[in-house]
Image: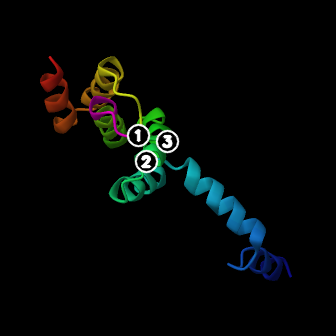
């Protein structure tokens, strides 16, 4: 009986389970990065910056670097060299070569 209840509660059609999974994905930095990249490719830079920031604040170096690029170029956010440097430095601390290169370019 318990297994049946468990299966019934975890069926893909259960809206509560879908909602929980959606929240989990939104809190997952890898999923946030994927969402940011999708918006970035579509040229929806403001929305991309929102999702890069979510992933970057959780320590994902690729998102930190990409957010730094957005600040450097003024895409989706106001151009701000200090903010770009901040995000590049965080990503570079994770030994991300592209971030280290981007940081050098700011000097």
Q: Are marks 2 and 1 in contact (CB under 8 Å)?
A: yes
Q: Is residue 37 magenta?
A: no
Pick the front one: 41 or 54: 41
Inter-mark Cα distance, 2 to 1 = 7 Å
Inter-mark Cα distance, 1 to 3 = 9 Å
- Which of the numbered marks, if any, corresponds to residue 48? 2
Q: Earlier in the sequence, mark 2 or mark 1?
A: 2
Inter-mark Cα distance, 3 to 2 = 5 Å
Q: Nearer the viewer, mark 2 or mark 1?
A: 1
SS at mark 2? helix
According to the picture, the residue beneath numbered tag 1 turns out to be: 76
Q: Is residue 54 above or below residue 28?
A: above
Which quarter of the rendering shows the N terminus?
bottom right
User: How far from the left and from the top, in percent, is residue 98?
Assistant: 18, 38
Q: Is residue 47 above or below residue 1?
A: above
Q: Earlier in the sequence, mark 1 or mark 3?
A: 3
Q: Determine whether, in the image, residue 50 is placed left or right of residue 103.
A: right
SS at mark 3? helix
Q: Which residues are magenta?
A: 71-76
């Amino acid at each position: 009986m318990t297994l049946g209840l468990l299966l019934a509660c975890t069926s893909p059609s259960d809206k509560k389970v879908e909602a929980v999974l959606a929240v989990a994905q939104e809190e997952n930095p890898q999923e946030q990065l994927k969402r940011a990249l999708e918006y970035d490719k579509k040229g929806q830079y403001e929305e991309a910056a929102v999702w890069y920031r979510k992933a970057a604040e959780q320590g994902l170096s690729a998102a930190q670097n990409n957010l730094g690029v957005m600040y450097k170029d003024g895409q989706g956010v106001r151009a701000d060299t200090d903010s770009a440097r901040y995000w590049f430095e965080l990503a570079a601390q994770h030994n991300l070569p592209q971030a280290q290169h981007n940081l050098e370019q700011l000097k």
